[in-house]
Amino acid sequence: MKKLFALFILLGVLFSGLNADLLQDVQKRGVLKAGVKYDFPPFGFVNEKGQVVGFDIDLVKYIAKKLGVKPVFTQVTSKTRIPMVQSGTVDIAAASMTHKVQRDLPIDFTISYYFDGQSILVRKDSTVKNYHDLSGKKVGVIQGATSGQNLLKVNPKVKLVYFQEYPQAIMALKRGKIDAVSTDYTWCVTQAKNSHGAFKVVGGTFTFEPYGMGVRENESNFRDAVNFAIQDAVRDGTYEKLYIKWFGTKPNRLPEVWPK
């Protein structure tokens, strides 16, 4: 009898999990818990006033408004963003995350909302011109990101040096402890611009990096609502305005918009 009762309890928990709806939960609590980066300008970073700002942050604010809730931001890194989505610590990760097949196994993704490619950041006096010149050199990459794997595919002779966060990699590059940092082009360009001539970007891009927002698996109602909000931002011009605000130019590619 006790075993039968325990079985009913277990089935009840399983079925309650199946019937759970993240969209309803978010709207009921009135808060969208968003994981964003604090160290990856212009997508997500802490400004001089101590405020978390950036393209990802503004887009999440728009999405939250469309859902009728308020956004609450939590810091994630390349290493922690997927586990924090899986655990429910955050409802969504808007953290400059490339949508890759291997990442789509533990979580789901929204439509792609930004399109980038991997590049190389070096000191101004560097003779490196592209990834071919990185043979035998120390290149900083970030834990949890796929930039290290990508770089080894095109140049197996690179010596990877892993960092937990981007400021650590920048400091190592500045001090000459590494020869380059390799990650997404937009971030590299931003760092070069903010360095006042200390750094430069070389080699263009050598990968395709479509960014998607990470959400928990099997939450189609929530994922649809976020997708619809992203597409509404394109339709009403908000996406282009935010893009110009943070990147200084009009987008050369927009997120897909489905016919109504």
Image (spheres, grey):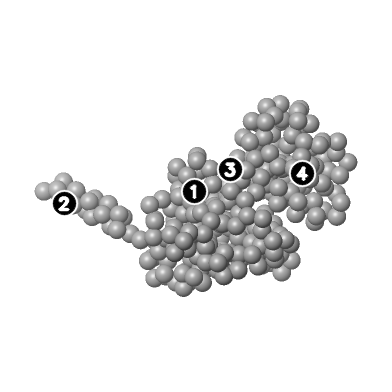
Question: Mark 1, mark 2: which one is toward the viewer?
Answer: 1
Answer with the quarter of the image where residue 143 lies: top right
Question: Mark 2, mark 4: which one is toward the viewer?
Answer: 4
The type of residue carrying mark 1 is Pro
Question: Mark 1, mark 4: which one is toward the viewer?
Answer: 4
Sequence-wise, which precedes: disc 1 or disc 4?
Answer: 1
Q: Secondary structure at mark 3?
A: loop
Question: To which residue does mark 3 refer?
Answer: 144
Question: Mark 2, mark 3: which one is toward the viewer?
Answer: 3
The type of residue carrying mark 3 is Gly
11 horizontally vs 21: left or right: left
Sequence-wise, which precedes: disc 2 or disc 4?
Answer: 2
Q: Secondary structure at mark 2?
A: helix
The type of residue carrying mark 4 is Leu
Question: To which residue does mark 4 refer?
Answer: 121
Sequence-wise, which precedes: disc 1 or disc 2?
Answer: 2
